[in-house]
Image (spheres, rainbow, N blue to C red):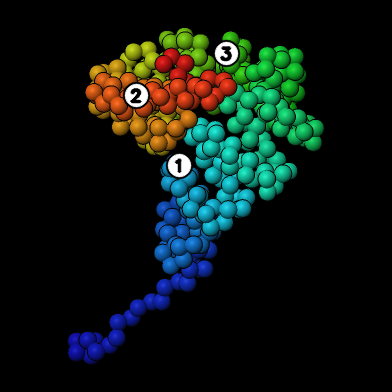
Amino acid sequence: MLAILALMPSLVLPADPPSVVFEKAVAALSAEDYGAAERGFRQVLQSQPKHVGALGNLGVVYSRTERPAKAIETYRQALRLSPQDPGLLLNLGLVYLKQESYKAAASSFQRLLKLRPNHAQAIELLATCHLQLGEAAAAIEKLEPLRRSNPKHAGILYLLGVAYLKQNDRQKGKLALDEMMSAALSATQASFLEGKAYYDGTRFAEAQEAFERVAQLDPAFPGVQRELGKTYVSLRTWEKAREALLRAVQQDPRDGEAHYFLGSSLVKEGHPAEGIHYLAFANKLKPDFWGVFYFLGRAKLQMNLSAEAVPLLERAVELNGDEESVFYQLGLALRACGRKADAQRAMAKVRELKEASRVPLQPQGASSNR
């Protein structure tokens, strides 16, 4: 019997063709089975390295699993093969936006709008970039036509309110926010959106009032403790900030933004070891966010561990090379390590970025206290 079996040929099941593997991977992505989706798209790319669909969807997998650096690399690879693909340009811009790399995000949305001038989502996202870059007038120019075509769109009204507040036009800002709140689902949601708009418009006292009103109505309202804590950070009310952010991480232990702001505020207060605890957890939740590496580097500098600070700050530069404050801290760390020439190059980059920007840019929650 053994001899007979030995003479039988091995049974090898035929592999699925790439088209079938691709369809299965797309189905896995739709079902949020990211492991299966990634394996499928990678398998397709082994036999068809220029398969734009597999590359684009693999970028989506990386983005949704908090691997933005890999997502950016993959979208760029796909765009080299298909440079006028609107979906790829949109997704690349969204990854950059999530990373707070606003110049890079704006570039992607601008490329998309050259192909699709009436792409409403791209216009709204480009306006968001303009706001974050201190270009309120450009944001308003993009948003007002959208408002006329969709006067009850809460997102557009929110951005317009922020833009007018940034221009110190309180009347138009309040009008847009009032219209936004009339479209909200509840008084609590309206106050929360109002607080967000005031925060983004750098009117922190009004933001505090709105968020405190939400917290009184519903202390467990999703995100309110985090946003209240962020507002207290901006107002340098450190004790209240710490209390609110601690409540936020207790309510939602996977709130990476709350961990980030709590850790960064502790670093700015001069408690680097305690700050590192929260920043390290934020890094697990959002492993490629430049701000986490920036504050981890600052914390190491405060602890006189400049050799450990340098690679952290260099990683922050890799992820976002448009922030003056990152190069400034890197220069300090390099100087402390005795690397004078490298430190001079970092400080020269600080001066270059200052001269290039019309409005001094500050990373969210980061460089206001350099």
Nearest to N terminus: mark 1 or mark 3 = 1
The residue identified by callout 1 is 68
The residue identified by callout 3 is 204
The residue closer to the viewer here, 79 or 205, is: 79
Residue shown at the point (35%, 78%) measured from the top left: 12
Spatial separation of the CA atoms under disc 1 and disc 2? 30 Å
At label 1, counting other C-alpha atoms closer than 10 Å, the crowd grade (few under 14, some 14-19, many 20 or more) is many
Position of 346 relative to 205 (above/below):
below
Residue shown at the point (43%, 23%) measured from the top left: 350
Visible residue check, residue 147 = yes
Q: Quadrant of the N terminus?
A: bottom left
Residue 216 place in picture, x, y as percent:
57, 14
Residue 90 place in picture, x, y as percent:
59, 45
The residue closer to the viewer here, 244 or 142, is: 142
Q: Residue furthest right?
A: 148
Residues marked 2 and 3 touching at CB (< 8 Å): no
Nearest to N terminus: mark 1 or mark 2 = 1
Residue shown at the point (43%, 10%) measured from the top left: 238
Q: Quadrant of residue 112?
A: top right
The residue identified by callout 2 is 344
Mark count: 3
Q: Quadrant of residue 268?
A: top left
* Dot 2 amino acid type: Gln
Is 278 on the left or on the right of 96, as rendered? left
* Dot 1 amino acid type: Pro
Visible residue check, residue 213 = no
Which numbered tag is attached to residue 141? none
Nearest to N terminus: mark 2 or mark 3 = 3
Is 323 on the left or on the right of 170, as rendered? left
